[in-house]
Image (cartoon, rainbow, N blue to C red):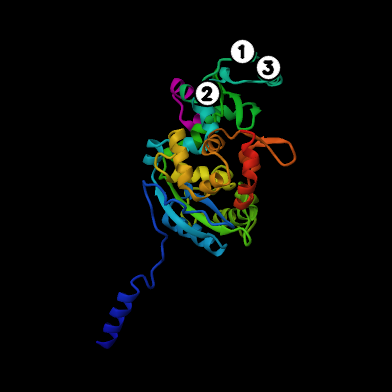
Amino acid sequence: KLFIQCTFWIWFAFPTLGTRQQPRLYHHRRLPILAFDAIGVNTALVFVKPHALNDQAVDFVRDHLSVAGCTVQHEARIPACQIVEQGIIDKHYGTLAELALKTDPRALKVTDESKAQFKDMFGIEWEGAPFETNLAAQQCLGLSGADLEACWRAGPCLKLAPGTYVAKLEGHELYTLNGFYLSMREEYTAGLGVHCMVVDFHEKDLNWQAFRSEVIGATDPAEAVSQSLRSKMLGAWKELGLEHEPSMKGNSVHASAGPLEALKERIVWLQQGGGDSAAAMEASIKDDGFGRRLVDAGVDAGIIVKWLEDNPFVATSTGEASRIFDVTECMDSDEMVVEAPQYAQCA
């Protein structure tokens, strides 16, 4: 009897004793203002991809991040229906998706050099080529996203600019931009969804470069360092219950490449309607701790919106021009806050 009474009072005082402690969940609402604003701390978004989404894999990812020195501050399960309704995956990929879904290739500003390369590769003038968007081509030909990608990849492909590729659909007289995108998109819109984690890590202990290369691992799991998350999930994919063996295309997890990309991804994935318009994006930036730090450093919120939506060219410290997401890739948050006013002058 005494044992039972003691057990009851221990449980009453410590109700979660012996259970897994889960970070607070949030769904369909804005994140708390200044939730992620600590100096000397990086904040990334990590999500488990649809093909790897199950509770065992999520626990594995969470535990790996914890051991690596990352703190999981928030989590959210985003179902496929919400990804479709809010256009989340298209916002996530931005220009890449815009080119694949909506852009008429004839409307692109293509250099004379690229036009000459196009003629050499396909034997037809750029101006006379039968272009189509991927959605129109899919509807016309009755192909799945995977089948369209297979046709698109079957022949030669020309890179027109970063993130902009054109190819002919094998067996059809049609050319499209980024014909791989519909297949990639279908993984998110027809799958189980994703499980998001907002993670913090201290710059002095773990910089963003090490977070990407050592904690998460290379894009191709087979090339990732042995103790990285992607490498471990490759080695244990059957035990974790993954749908298929991880590969470069399906590498189990996504992680923000830098602080600016992380800001965009928090808004797109976790702020309902946060990326629906420029005004909504500005409000979301000011609701985010790192976004507020950029504004407080003298960067107009409208300029940050342009960075997140257009990925424009900015001048680097060497005087060369490069796209803002490339410039800030693997940069720690504090460094970007210092450098941001310089980049804003180019906007």
Q: Quadrant of residue 107?
A: top right
User: For residue 142: magenta?
Assistant: yes
Marks 2 and 3: in contact by CB < 8 Å? no
For mark 2, what is the residue? Answer: 103
Distance from disc 1 to disc 3, alpha carbons, whole Å, reads 10 Å
Above or below, comparing residue 142 to residue 26 in the picture: above
Magenta stretch, residue numbers: 137-148
Marks 3 and 1: in contact by CB < 8 Å? no
Tell me which amino acid carries mark 3.
Answer: Lys
Q: Residues within 10 Å of mark 3 (few under 14, many from 20)?
A: few
Query: x, y (%) of residue 144?
Result: 46, 30
Distance from disc 3 to disc 2, alpha carbons, whole Å, reads 21 Å
Q: Earlier in the sequence, mark 3 or mark 2?
A: 2
* Residue 334 as seen in the image, left or right of residue 104: right
For mark 1, what is the residue? Answer: 127
* Dominant SS type (magenta): helix
Q: Residues within 10 Å of mark 1 (few under 14, many from 20)?
A: few
Please give the label number shown on residue 99. Answer: none
Tell me which amino acid carries mark 1.
Answer: Glu
The extreme bottom residue here reads: 2
Query: x, y (%) of residue 235?
Result: 57, 56
Q: Secondary structure at mark 1?
A: helix
* Residue 115 as seen in the image, left or right of residue 307: right
The residue closer to the viewer here, 342 or 174, is 342
Question: What residue is drawn where x is 60% and y is 25%?
Answer: 166
Q: Earlier in the sequence, mark 1 or mark 3?
A: 3
Query: x, y (%) of residue 32?
Result: 42, 52
Marks 2 and 1: in contact by CB < 8 Å? no
Q: Secondary structure at mark 2?
A: loop
Please give the label number shown on residue 119. Answer: 3
Q: Residues within 10 Å of mark 2 (few under 14, many from 20)?
A: some
